[in-house]
Amino acid sequence: RKEVEQDPGPFNVPEGATVAFNCTYSNSASQSFFWYRQDCRKEPKLLMSVYSSGNEDGRFTAQLNRASQYISLLIRDSKLSDSATYLCVVNNYGQNFVFGPGTRLSVLP
Amino acid sequence: DTGVSQNPRHKITKRGQNVTFRCDPISEHNRLYWYRQTLGQGPEFLTYFQNEAQLEKSRLLSDRFSAERPKGSFSTLEIQRTEQGDSAMYLCASSLEGGHKASEQYFGPGTRLTVT
């Protein structure tokens, strides 16, 4: 089993839709969690950290469920510019960061 | 530009040649990471430095790969005797660590290696 798993998609959604991605991780000792966004042929860029209590940044909401070992990302009111690959990242402090394979999102006009 | 920079951006080399890539992190960042990414996959961890100390190396990193960060600032990644399977995007990232939880990483634009 891979350490971090994501549904590769693609998720094709119309503009204005709400879309959610899940990510599961296998290392119960993981302490830090992030969502990164990666555009085609570009480097990953931090979207948001994921806090234990959940956190929101504009149209984006991240949740962490430690008991079930998954992280979610919710995007409301999707924009065309949200089309990208969303990478889930997990870290056990003092060790390296593990990236999931990414979920591809296409927002259609 | 105060972000992470990488050079060269593209490198085409013949099988068996050696290549070296450079990464300049954000100046105040003490951690520097190297990753490799192939199409359709997330970045795979290769190695990381805390200041000048190399703290961890992935099992993916064969003996042909070596990385240095001699003064705790820029870093180089060298691949000796390149193979076609080394073709990938090599990404560098940096972060400022000091607390009890890992900090966000900031990535450079990557070096795309093609081995012919």
Image (cartoon, coloured by chain):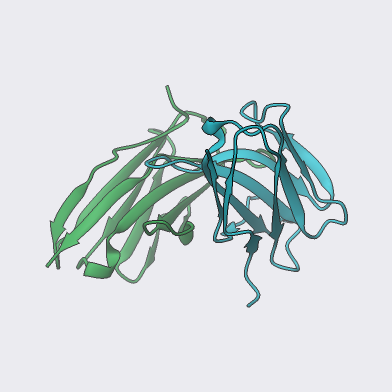
* Of A69 and B74, the residue lying toward us: B74
Q: Give x and y (percent) for residue A38.
A: 41, 56
List x then y, in percent, for residue B38: 46, 40
Q: Residue at x 87, y 51 (%)?
A: B70
- Residue A92: tell me if it is visible: no
> Vertical placement of A89 versus B15: above or below?
below
Q: Give the residue drawn at x 43%, y 53%.
A: A35
Q: Quadrant of the N terminus of chain B?
A: bottom right
Total residue callouts = 0
Instruction: Say left or right for B26 vs B112.
Output: right
User: The chain coloured cyan carries which letter?
Assistant: B
Q: Position of residue A81 (x, y in %)?
A: 28, 69
Picture quadrant of residue A60:
bottom left
Which residue corresponds to the image point at 57% horizontal and 59% vertical from the top-left? Answer: B9
- Residue A9 in view, yes or no: yes
Q: Position of residue B69 (x, y in %)?
A: 81, 51
Asked whether, in this view, residue A85 is left or right of residue B97, the answer is left
Location of residue A18 by image quarter? bottom left
- What residue sits 62% from the left and 70% below the top? B3
Tell which chain the image draws in green.
A
